[in-house]
Amino acid sequence: MPSLSNLSALAGFLSLAAVAVDAKPVGYTVTPQQHGSSANATTGSSSHHYDTTAKNVTISSVKNGTTYHDDNGGINWAALRCPQNMDGGVDGILPTPTYGTEGRVWMVCSETLIRAPRRAVYDALVDFGRYGKWNSYVTNVEVVHPTSKAPLQNSDDPAHKKAVYEGMDLSFTFTGLGGEGVVTTGPEVLTVLNPSSSSSSGRSSTSAIKATKPRKCRHSASTFATSEKKAVAATGEEDYSINAWRSDLKVADELIRSEHPNVLTDAGEGFTRYVSWETYYEGKSTETFKMLQTQMQALNDQQGQDLKAYLEKKN
């Protein structure tokens, strides 16, 4: 397996491999990755449409005895769980905040119980500068300059120190995707930052999730705990945290429609339930990337275990 510098190159390699084994030909050519210039890419405020109307989703994707919708018809994010069979049809494929329920094709999903406060898990997931300290899959995340779109190598650059915000451009480095020792990079856009669905600065769990203007995502622990207790007492709904990013990769001038949400809920006795999935939607290269599903599932599982070990050691 050659060293592949970006996911576009990996897509091209997989396309050739599919043809070599008489798989269904993939009808596209490979173009270099593009940062930030694709449709719906944003810096600062976002123009994404967030679909919160779930359709044809079975109970296999949610907690036993709960429904997929909240009282207002939106997606009940706190109830989502990894389905037992991710190849069991579209009804078992979880939706995402940006792309919703239409056009789902395949996914990977991992669920991990971590003995750490929910806020600590949330903060670790958006503390991109420390990914190299714990993550064996996404081994590095670089902030991409909002104007030049070039990765910021100097951590003293003011743009690098800016608080994370929805619409932020990032460059992920993946290790092992495509084979042992293979290192690839891919552009991502931060789409959702919501440390508490009941927080005054977050969004209500029954309202549509949509991006807002750039804002800091950190809150004091006391404010977080107080707002959570008030919301649960008032509504009876389970509080949750969610963050997500979507691919900004283009192959043959087509945006790869995939998104990676992380949903956190309190599991009791000091544990946080971490449900992390990546859903791929209809597109010319979707089936090509599906060749990586088994690998990606194993790497996503390992990422959950890496995060668990990192946080439980700290706590």
Image (tube, rainbow, N blue to C red):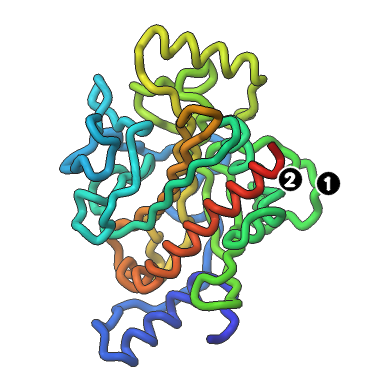
Secondary element at image label 2: helix
Query: Residue 211: x, y in percent?
Result: 46, 33
Along the line of sight, the residue nearer the viewer: 194 or 187: 194
The answer for how far apart the CA atoms under marks 2 and 1 are is 7 Å
Is 36 situated left or right of 47 in this image? right
**Of helix, strand and loop, which one carries label 1?**
loop
Q: Where is residue 66 in the image (x, y as percent from the top left)?
A: 24, 30
Q: Is 207 or 83 nearer to us in this picture?
A: 83
- Give the left or right position of residue 84, taking residue 227 as reference: left
Nearest the camera: 45 or 206? 206
Work out whether residue 250 or residue 23 is closer to the camera in this orientation and state it.
Answer: 23
Question: In the image, is residue 198 above or below residue 294?
Answer: above
Q: Which mark is residue 156?
A: 1
Label 1 crowd bin: few (<14), some (14–19), many (20+), radius 10 Å: few
Q: Where is residue 158 shown, x and y percent of the image?
A: 78, 41
Q: Which amino acid does label 2 sit on?
A: His
* Res. 148 visible in picture: no
Q: What residue type is labelled 1?
A: Asp
Q: Report the disc number at residue 59.
A: none
> Residue extending furthest right?
156
In the image, residue 148 sits, relative to residue 195, either above or below, namely below
Q: Where is residue 27 in the image (x, y as percent from the top left)?
A: 29, 79
Q: Residue 160 carries which label?
A: 2
* Residue drawn at point x = 49 percent, y = 12 percent: 229
* Location of residue 71 with respect to 138 vertically, above or below: above
Find out whether the residues at labels 2 and 1 contact each other: C-beta distance under 8 Å: yes
| Residue occupying image coordinates x 26% and y 56% | 85
Q: Residue at x 45, y 28 (%)?
A: 240
Whether residue 72 sits left or right of residue 229 in the image: it is left
**Identity of the residue drawn at 65% across and 52% down:** 144
Residue 15 appears in the picture as rendered: yes
Would residue 87 be found to the left or right of residue 117 on screen? Answer: left
